[in-house]
Amino acid sequence: MSTIDKKPRLKTSAMIASIAAEGQLTRSAPFGHALVELARNKASVIGMTADLGKYTDLHLFAKAFPERYYQMGMAEQLLMGAAAGFAHEGAQPFVTTYAVFATRRAYDFIHQTIAEDNLDVKIVCALPGLTTGYGPSHQAAEDLALMRAMPNMTVIDPCDALDIEQMVPAISAHNGPVYARLLRGNVPAVLDEYDYRFELGKAKLLRDGNDVLLISSGIMTMRSLEVAKALAADNVDVAVLHVPTIKPLDTETIVREASRTGRMVVVAENHTIIGGLGEAVSRELLSAGVTPAFRQVALPDEFLDAGALPTLHARYGIAADAMCETIKGWLG
């Protein structure tokens, strides 16, 4: 074997599936329960999946509404094409699979059969970013970049159980295609204590601070809140702006908060550094003539290792402890 350009694979401990810390408050299957509640009052809602009902919490919908549940087998392209057909006939499909299979394997079918016709299909995908330890085949580190680039597509990255529960009726009320990341199983409950309510296309300031503005989405909002509490002990005052809707972006709120003088702006995302929230935010700031000290916490532009999530999150700098050290280093 040639030694040229061969990076050794680092070993990690056994893989785990949950992103919740030990003892953290969680709620079980928030997406599945919210979808069942929605469907009770909206007959057009149907559930569709590609052999992953149990692993996307859609099995709860299947049990409640078996006549409105469609198991398409391991055929993601067929899944998207069939969803488009149902939408043409007046149904509102909620489609689930893993994020890698939707955004990589079935991208063209979403693009041509759903997005081009602006159809009312909601694509809700598990294992976003680095939320699985199974390596590049299952790590959707570039899904937001791919879906942001698709015309007509609304893109959402929810933080926790509350975000997901409130997201479901909100995206159902929106007429058009939606791609949403999904946290499944026992999902952390973080935002309940912040008087938070999900609004499509709106960013929310969860806490204020004078030294650093953390702009985040998805699980990185949970991490950002942990970082803000930890850095307070070092007299670093951190604000956290949660941006659950990646497209359309709440430019007005982001620019307003980033315009405050004296604060470093850090965008934190569970996504490759290319094409995600960080690049979207930096473009809007530059277009508005707002130029604070700007940094990104994101996954590197490379294929990621397999292993246990705590190990991987620390390795790639998206764990709370790693973020604290990085931000303190930037502040000097």
Image: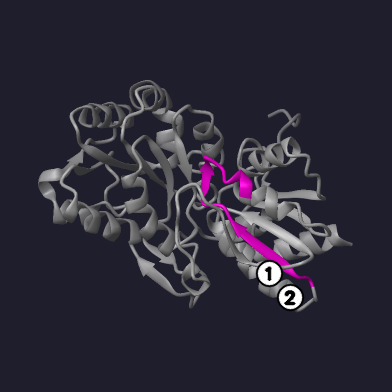
Q: Is residue 101 magenta?
A: no
Q: Residue at x 72, y 35 (%)?
A: 287
Q: Give the x, y percent position of residue 54.
A: 28, 53
Question: Quadrant of the image for the C terminus?
Answer: bottom right
> Which residue is outermost to the right?
332
Amino acid found under the numbered disc labelled 1: Ala
In the rendered structure, are the residues bearing label 2 and label 1 in contact, judged by CB atoms less than 8 Å apart? yes
Amino acid found under the numbered disc labelled 2: Ala
Q: Residue at x 66, y 65 (%)?
A: 320
Drawn side of residue 227 relative to residue 168, left or right: right
Q: Which mark is residue 228?
A: 1
Q: Is residue 10 visible?
A: no
Against 44, residue 58 (above or below) is below
* Disc 2 packing (10 Å; few <14; some 14–19; many ≥20): few
Question: Quadrant of the image for the N terminus?
Answer: top right
Q: Which residue is mark 2?
A: 232
Q: Is residue 246 magenta?
A: yes
